[in-house]
C-alpha cells in the first residue's frame, strides 16, 4: 500500500486565510491527505456548505484527498440521510469517516454509494467490527480505516492495544491511517487540546519521531498531523522522512572519523539474519572498507543501548563492521562513533532479522 502524509484543519474553529496558507505550504512539501472534522457543525446546511466547499475545492486543486469526519448528529443537524450521500459529493469530499458505527450491513451498503466516496471506519477498537462489515460483501477498495486521536492527556491508546487493533485492518488489506501531534499547534475540534495523537506514548515526542514510529510498525499507511497548525519546521521534518525506510538519527562523538561517518551515512545497512541479543550487526561494510585503517578511540568504557560502534584496527576480520548496541557491554576492539537519539530508542524494536536500516545526522 502506498504511504502518505496528511494534515488536519477545522473550519468551524479556524481562520479561512490561515487554512489556505497551511494547505498550500503542506501541498508544496508533498502532503496529500486532508482530515476535516464536521462533528461540531451547528450553522445549518447552507452555512456549512459555504464554509466547507471552498476550502475542499482548494484542497482538491492542490492534490489532497479529503475525508470528512461525521457522526449521526451531523446528519440530523444538516437534515440529510445516510441513504443519500450527495451532499458530501457536492462539497467535493473524497470520503467520509464514520465516527460511530452501524450494524455492518449499513456500512457495506454505504461503500457502494454512487459517488465513489470512501467509507472510513474507526480503527481504535479491538473488536470484529471490520470482519462483520466485510462479511456483508462490502466494496473493499472504498473501505478505509483510521484511528481516533485523543485530546486529553492520558487518554491515548497504549501501544500494544494499537497494534492489535491495527492488525485487524492490515490483515484484511485495508488502507489505514493514524494521527501524530504537533508540539506547536493548538487548533482542534474541542476546547481541550493536550495534543492530538493516536498513541499516548507520542504525545510529547518530536513530530518526526512519531511519524517514523508509525511507519516503522508497517501497520499504518497514512500518517496525519492531528492538530493545526503545525509549524513550518515540523511540516518540513515530517516531509523529509522516507516512509519506506527505517532511518535512525545519530549524534556523532567528537572523535568520530570521516571514515566512520562515511560508513554510517553512505551505506544501506542490514541486520544479519542470524541475530544476537548483544548488537544489531551490519557486516557488509566491513567487506567494503576492509583495507581502510581505523585506529582505536573511545573504546575503553561500557557501551549503552543505542550506541553505534565500529570495529577498529584491533578487531581483525571484523574491522569496520558497524553495530548498534542492544545490551550494555565492553569491548576495546570497537570504537564508539555516535549515539541513536534518545527519543528514537523505541524504534530499535524494529531491527528484526535481515532488516534494512539507515543512519542520518540531519533528521
Image: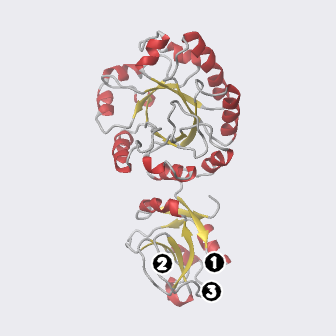
**First-in-chain label (3 vs 2):** 3
Looking at the rendered image, the disc whose residue lies closer to the viewer, 3 or 1, is 1
Q: Is mark 3 on a helix, strand or loop?
A: loop
Give coordinates of residue 51: x percent, y percent. 62, 18
In depth, the one of 246 and 254 nearer the eye is 254
Label placed on residue 256: 1
Say whether marks 3 and 1 touch (CB < 8 Å).
no
Residue shown at 47%/53% (left/top)?
Answer: 216
Mark 3, Cα crowd under 10 Å, few <14 / some 14-19 / many 20+, is few
Horizontal relation, residue 303 to residue 165: left or right: right
* Marks 3, 2: nearer the viewer: 2
Is residue 291 depicted above or below 245 in this figure?
below
- Using residue 71 as the reference point, say whether residue 241 is left or right of it: right
Give the mark nearer the N terminus: 2 vs 1. Answer: 1
Residue marked by disc 3: 293
Q: Disc 3 to disc 1, how far (Cα)?
A: 13 Å
Q: What crowding class fits label 1: few (fewer than 14 Cα within 10 Å), some (14-19), or many (20 or more)?
A: some
Look at the picture and state if 256 lies above or below 26: below
Q: Spatial distance from mark 2 to mark 1, Cα to Cα?
A: 15 Å
What's the residue at 52%, 78% (across, down)? 321
Helix, strand or loop under label 2 = loop
Separation of marks 3 and 2 at Cα, in angstroms: 22 Å
Is residue 218 visible from the viewing direction of this image? no
Tally of marks: 3
Residue labelled with disc 2: 303
**Dividing the picture into quarters, in which one does residue 19 lie?**
top right
Mark 3 vs 1, N-terminal side: 1
Amino acid at each position: 500500500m502506498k504511504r502518505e502524509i496528511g494534515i488536519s484543519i477545522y473550519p468551524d474553529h479556524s481562520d479561512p486565510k490561515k487554512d489556505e496558507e497551511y494547505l498550500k505550504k503542506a501541498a508544496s512539501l508533498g502532503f496529500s491527505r486532508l482530515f476535516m472534522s464536521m462533528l461540531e457543525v451547528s450553522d445549518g446546511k447552507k452555512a456549512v456548505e459555504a464554509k466547507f466547499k471552498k476550502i475542499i475545492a482548494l484542497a482538491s486543486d492542490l492534490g489532497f484527498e479529503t475525508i470528512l469526519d461525521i457522526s449521526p448528529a451531523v446528519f440530523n443537524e444538516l437534515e440529510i440521510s445516510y441513504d443519500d450521500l450527495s451532499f458530501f459529493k457536492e462539497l467535493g469530499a473524497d470520503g467520509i469517516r464514520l465516527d460511530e458505527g452501524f450494524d455492518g450491513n449499513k456500512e457495506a451498503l454505504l461503500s457502494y454509494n454512487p459517488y465513489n466516496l470512501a467509507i472510513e471506519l474507526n480503527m481504535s477498537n479491538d473488536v470484529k467490527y471490520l470482519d462483520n462489515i466485510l462479511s456483508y460483501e462490502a466494496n473493499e477498495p472504498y473501505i478505509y480505516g483510521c484511528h481516533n486521536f485523543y485530546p486529553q492527556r492520558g487518554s491515548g491508546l497504549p501501544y500494544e492495544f494499537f497494534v492489535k487493533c491495527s492488525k485487524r485492518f492490515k490483515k484484511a488489506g485495508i488502507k489505514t491511517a493514524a494521527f501524530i501531534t504537533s508540539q506547536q499547534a493548538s487548533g482542534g475540534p474541542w476546547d481541550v487540546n493536550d495534543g492530538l495523537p493516536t498513541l499516548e506514548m507520542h504525545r510529547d515526542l518530536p513530530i518526526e519521531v512519531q511519524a517514523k514510529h508509525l511507519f516503522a510498525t508497517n501497520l499504518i499507511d497514512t500518517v496525519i498531523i492531528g492538530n493545526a497548525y503545525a509549524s513550518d519546521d515540523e511540516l518540513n521534518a515530517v516531509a523529509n522522512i522516507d516512509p519506506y525506510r527505517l532511518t535512525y538519527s545519530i549524534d556523532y562523538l567528537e572523535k568520530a572519523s570521516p571514515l566512520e561517518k562515511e560508513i554510517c551515512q553512505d551505506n544501506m545497512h542490514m541486520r544479519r539474519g542470524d541475530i544476537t541479543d548483544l548488537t544489531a550487526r551490519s557486516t557488509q561494510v566491513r567487506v567494503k572498507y576492509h583495507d581502510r585503517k581505523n585506529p582505536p578511540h573511545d573504546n575503553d568504557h561500557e557501551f549503552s543501548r543505542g550506541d553505534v560502534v565500529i570495529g577498529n584496527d584491533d578487531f581483525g576480520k571484523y574491522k569496520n563492521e558497524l553495530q548498534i548496541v542492544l545490551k550494555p557491554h565492553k569491548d576495546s576492539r570497537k570504537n564508539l562513533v555516535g549515539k541513536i537519539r534518545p527519543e528514537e530508542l523505541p524504534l530499535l524494536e524494529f531491527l528484526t532479522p535481515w532488516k534494512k536500516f539507515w543512519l542520518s545526522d540531519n533528521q
